[in-house]
Image: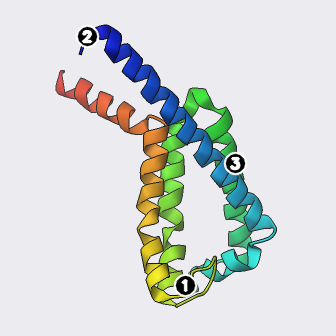
């Protein structure tokens, strides 16, 4: 591939990544707002019983966090790699709620069978990947590793 094609490919990939970054930002904004409003009871049902915090506090805090992270994905373009890592870590930190919903057979968000709740568990890694890929965090990490190998 010549340099001209590489540049076009890079620009197209960057635009696609940016679109997915914006979509994830909007998704997080809506999820955060729903934590604080219309889906509060369903989110409350997902808070693991073993967590030593008030469930309502956890739902409110995670909703505010999702709103902030969604806004950061949309507006903090100069910090996109850092924001990508933070969003990915957030998705890992809330995963126990999904596991709790599955293990305790909690019906919420239309997930009313063990199979549906189990299948949902596989979407959390997709969200982690989405956050890292769309923000260029994977690419930045690989670039840093390659620089260290060349030293």
Look at the picture and state if 121 lies above or below 80. Answer: below
User: How far is mark 3 from mark 2, CA to CA?
Assistant: 41 Å
User: How far is mark 1 from mark 2, CA to CA?
Assistant: 57 Å
- The residue depicted at 53 percent of the width and 90 percent of the height is 105
Which of discs 3 and 2 lies nearer the camera? The answer is: 2
Q: 38 or 104, which lies in front?
A: 38
- The residue depicted at 64 percent of the width and 48 percent of the height is 69
Residue at disc 2, secondary structure: loop
| Rendered image quadrant of residue 64 | bottom right
- The residue depicted at 42 percent of the width and 50 percent of the height is 129
Q: Position of residue 32 (x, y in %)?
A: 71, 59
Q: Which residue is mark 3?
A: 68
Mark 1: few/some/many CA within 10 Å (<14, 14-19, 20+):
few
Q: Which of the labelled discs sits on residue 2, or is there none? A: 2
Is the residue under label 2 in contact with that under label 1 (CB below 8 Å)? no
Is any part of residue 54 visible from this angle?
A: no
Task: Tell me if 128 is positioned left or right of 69 in this view.
Answer: left
Q: Position of residue 96 (x, y in %)?
A: 49, 73
User: How far is mark 1 from mark 3, CA to CA?
Assistant: 26 Å
Mark 3: few/some/many CA within 10 Å (<14, 14-19, 20+):
some
- The residue lying furthest to the left in this view is 150
Q: 55 or 29, which lies in front?
A: 29
Task: Tell me if 20 is positioned left or right of 147 in this view.
Answer: right
Q: Which of the labelled discs sits on residue 50, or is there none? A: 1
């Amino acid at each position: 591939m010549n340099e001209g094609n590489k540049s076009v490919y890079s620009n197209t990939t960057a635009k696609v990544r940016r679109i997915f970054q914006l979509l994830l930002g909007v998704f997080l904004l809506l999820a955060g707002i729903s934590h604080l409003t219309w889906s509060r009871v369903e989110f409350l049902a997902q808070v693991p019983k073993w967590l030593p915090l008030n469930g309502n506090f956890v739902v409110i805090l995670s909703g505010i966090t999702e709103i902030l992270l969604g806004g950061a994905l949309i507006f903090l373009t100069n910090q996109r790699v850092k924001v990508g890592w933070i969003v990915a870590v957030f998705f890992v930190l809330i995963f126990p709620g999904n596991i709790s919903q599955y293990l305790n057979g909690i019906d919420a968000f239309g997930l009313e069978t063990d199979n549906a709740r189990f299948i949902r568990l596989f979407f959390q890694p997709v969200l982690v990947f989405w956050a890292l890929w769309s923000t260029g965090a994977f690419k930045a990490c690989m670039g840093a590793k390659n620089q260290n190998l060349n030293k």
